[in-house]
Image (spheres, rainbow, N blue to C red):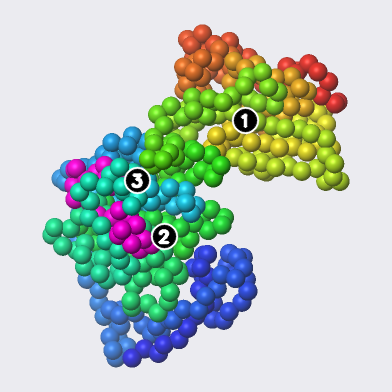
C-alpha cells in the first residue's frame, strides 16, 4: 500500500507545496493554499510491484486524411449563442461557460437546452439547485412544458454511470463544475484536485459517447474561472458572460474556440422572461445618445467578425486632491494613461491637474487599441467644451510618438456606421481601402496622420 501524505495546493494556479504559507510562490496569490491528501508511490501501470518497468501498448497511428464525415452541429435557434460557439454545438465537444454570480449563466443555458430539446435528448444536471427550483425558473422563462430531463446530483461517479449508456442524452448541462466531487479524492468540492478530476472524467465520457457537454464555472473576484487554469485547456470552448449589474445588457464572449473564431460576441438583454437576444447591438448601445453633448465620441469597433458602434464618454474636471483621480469603466486603465501622456507630451494639452473619468456606455468592455482615437477625441471635447460632430465616428490606434495608425477591416466598420445614419468618419490617413469604402457609403472622411491634427479640430484653447 502506498503511504498517504498531505500537500498544500494553491487554489488559484494549482501549484503544490510541502508546507503552508500565506502567499503562493508560483502565482503570488494570498491565502490560497489548502491542504489536500496525496497518495505517494509510483503511478499504476508504469511499474510492477517488484519495481520493474512494464511495457506500454503500441499506438495505432492513422493517416491525417480520414473517411469520417465532419461532425454535425446542433443549432439552438438562438442566433447570438450559435454565433459565439461557431455555428452550433459540436457533438463530443466540451464547453465551459463562466461569469459573475447572478449574471444569468443558468438562465441562458436553460433557455439554450430547452431550444435544443426538439432536436435531441437533453439533460440539465444541477449541483446547486433542487429540481423544484429549476422548475420554478423554467416556468418563469416559459419553457416549463419542454421535454428536458432534470437531475440534482454532485457525484461524478453517479453522473458518469448515467451518461455512459446507449440511451444517454446527446446534450448535457452541468451546473456547476465547482459543486461536483470525485469520491476517490480526499478534498472538498471546488478544490483544484476535485475540479480537475471531475472535469476530466466528464469530458472523457462526453468524447466517448459524442455528447455535447456544457460546464458552468464560477469566477474569482478577478474575473477568471475559479479552479486550476488547466480546466480551460481541457475544454474545447471557453465562453464568458459579461455585464454590469446596473445595465440590462449581457455580453457572451468566446475567448477560446476550437470550432470557430475567438473574440466573437453575442449580445443579450436581461428581461423578466429571461435573456433576449439583440440582433443590432450598435443601435441599442446608441439609443440614449445625445449628440450635442461635449465629452462623447462614437467608436466604430470590431468584436470578432461583428462591427459594433459604442459611445465613449469622458469627463475632465479640476481636481480637488493632490493626486488627480483616473477612473475607467469598460476600457484599459493603462491605455488611458498612455493616451493622456501622449496628449500632454506631443500636443501640449495640459491634463495633469485634472480628474479624468472614462466610461464605455452600455456595459461593453472594449479591448481594441483602435479605440485610442475615440478616447482622445472624447477627452479633448470634455476639456474644451466643444462637442464631437454628432454624425461622426472615429477609430485609430495612437503611437507613443503621436502618430495615428491604421486598424483592421476599416471597410466593415464604416459600412456599419453608414447603416446607422452616420455621415462622417475621422480615421487614420493614407488608407486607400478606407477611402474607397467611405466614398461608396457617401461618407465624408477626415484623414489624420498625427494626434496634433485631431487637437486642431477643437479650436478652443486646450491649455497649452
Q: Kindly identify which residue carries mark 2.
A: 231
Mark 3 or mark 1, which has the lower sequence index? 3
Q: Kindly identify which residue carries mark 3.
A: 140
| Mark 2 vs 1: CB contact within 8 A | no
- In the figure, is residue 66 to the left or right of 365? left
Q: Which residue is at 52% across, 64% downward? A: 12
- Measuring from the top left, give residue 75's x and y in whole percent: 26, 39
Q: Which residue is at 46% across, 78% downward? A: 36
Report crowding for label 1: few under 14, some 14 to 19, many 20 or more residues within 10 A (C-alpha).
many
Q: CA distance from mark 3 to mark 1?
A: 36 Å
Question: Seen from this angle, which residue lies furthest left?
Answer: 166
Mark 2 or mark 1, which has the lower sequence index? 2
Residue 121 inside the magenta-drawn segment: yes
| Image quadrant occupied by the N terminus | bottom left
Regarding residue 411, the answer to whether it shows in the image is no
Residue 272 inside the magenta-drawn segment: no
In front: label 2 or label 1: 1
Q: Which residue is at 77% across, 27% downward? A: 383
| Image quadrant occupied by the C terminus | top right
Magenta span of residues: 110-135
**Label disc, if present, on residue 312 of the rendered structure:** 1
Amino acid at each position: 500500500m502506498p503511504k498517504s501524505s498531505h500537500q498544500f495546493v494553491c487554489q488559484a494556479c494549482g501549484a503544490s507545496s510541502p508546507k503552508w504559507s500565506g502567499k503562493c510562490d508560483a502565482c503570488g496569490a494570498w491565502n490560497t493554499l489548502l491542504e489536500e491528501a496525496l497518495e505517494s508511490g509510483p503511478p499504476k501501470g508504469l511499474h510492477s510491484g517488484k519495481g520493474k518497468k512494464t511495457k506500454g501498448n503500441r499506438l495505432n497511428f492513422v493517416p491525417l486524411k480520414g473517411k469520417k464525415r465532419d461532425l454535425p452541429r446542433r443549432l439552438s435557434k438562438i442566433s447570438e449563442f450559435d454565433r459565439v460557439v461557431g455555428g452550433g454545438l459540436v457533438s463530443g465537444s466540451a464547453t465551459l461557460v463562466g461569469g459573475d454570480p447572478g449574471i444569468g449563466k443558468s438562465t441562458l443555458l436553460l433557455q439554450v437546452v430547452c431550444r435544443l430539446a426538439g432536436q435531441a435528448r437533453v439533460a440539465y444536471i444541477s449541483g446547486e439547485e433542487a429540481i423544484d427550483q429549476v422548475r420554478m425558473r423554467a416556468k418563469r422563462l416559459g419553457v416549463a412544458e419542454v421535454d428536458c430531463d432534470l437531475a440534482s446530483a454532485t457525484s461524478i461517479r453517479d453522473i458518469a454511470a448515467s451518461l455512459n449508456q446507449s440511451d444517454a442524452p446527446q446534450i448535457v448541462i452541468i451546473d456547476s463544475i465547482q459543486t461536483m466531487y470525485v469520491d476517490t479524492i480526499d478534498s472538498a468540492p471546488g478544490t483544484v484536485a476535485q475540479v480537475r478530476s471531475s472535469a476530466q472524467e466528464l469530458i472523457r465520457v462526453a468524447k466517448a459517447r459524442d455528447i455535447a457537454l456544457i460546464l458552468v464555472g464560477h469566477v474569482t473576484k478577478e474575473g477568471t474561472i475559479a479552479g486550476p487554469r488547466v480546466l480551460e485547456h481541457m475544454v474545447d470552448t471557453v465562453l464568458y458572460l459579461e455585464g454590469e449589474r446596473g445595465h440590462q445588457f449581457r455580453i457572451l464572449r468566446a475567448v477560446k474556440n476550437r470550432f470557430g473564431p475567438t473574440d466573437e460576441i453575442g449580445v443579450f438583454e436581461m428581461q423578466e422572461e429571461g435573456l433576449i437576444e439583440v440582433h443590432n447591438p450598435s443601435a441599442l448601445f446608441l439609443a440614449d445618445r445625445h449628440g450635442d453633448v461635449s465629452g462623447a465620441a462614437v467608436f466604430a469597433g470590431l468584436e470578432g467578425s461583428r462591427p459594433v458602434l459604442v459611445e465613449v464618454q469622458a469627463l475632465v474636471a479640476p481636481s480637488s486632491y493632490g493626486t488627480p483621480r483616473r477612473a475607467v469603466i469598460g476600457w484599459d486603465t493603462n491605455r488611458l494613461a498612455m493616451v493622456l501622456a501622449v496628449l500632454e507630451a506631443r500636443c501640449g494639452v495640459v491634463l495633469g491637474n485634472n480628474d479624468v473619468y472614462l466610461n464605455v456606455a452600455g456595459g461593453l468592455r472594449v479591448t481594441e487599441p483602435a479605440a485610442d482615437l475615440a478616447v482622445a477625441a472624447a477627452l479633448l471635447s470634455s476639456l474644451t467644451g466643444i462637442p464631437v460632430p454628432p454624425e461622426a465616428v472615429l477609430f485609430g490606434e495612437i503611437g507613443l510618438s503621436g502618430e495615428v495608425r491604421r486598424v483592421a477591416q476599416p471597410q466593415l466598420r464604416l459600412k456599419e456606421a453608414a447603416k446607422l445614419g452616420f455621415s462622417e468618419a475621422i480615421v487614420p490617413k493614407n488608407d486607400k481601402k478606407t477611402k474607397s469604402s467611405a466614398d461608396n457609403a457617401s461618407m465624408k472622411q477626415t484623414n489624420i496622420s498625427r494626434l496634433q491634427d485631431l487637437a486642431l479640430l477643437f479650436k478652443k484653447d486646450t491649455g497649452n
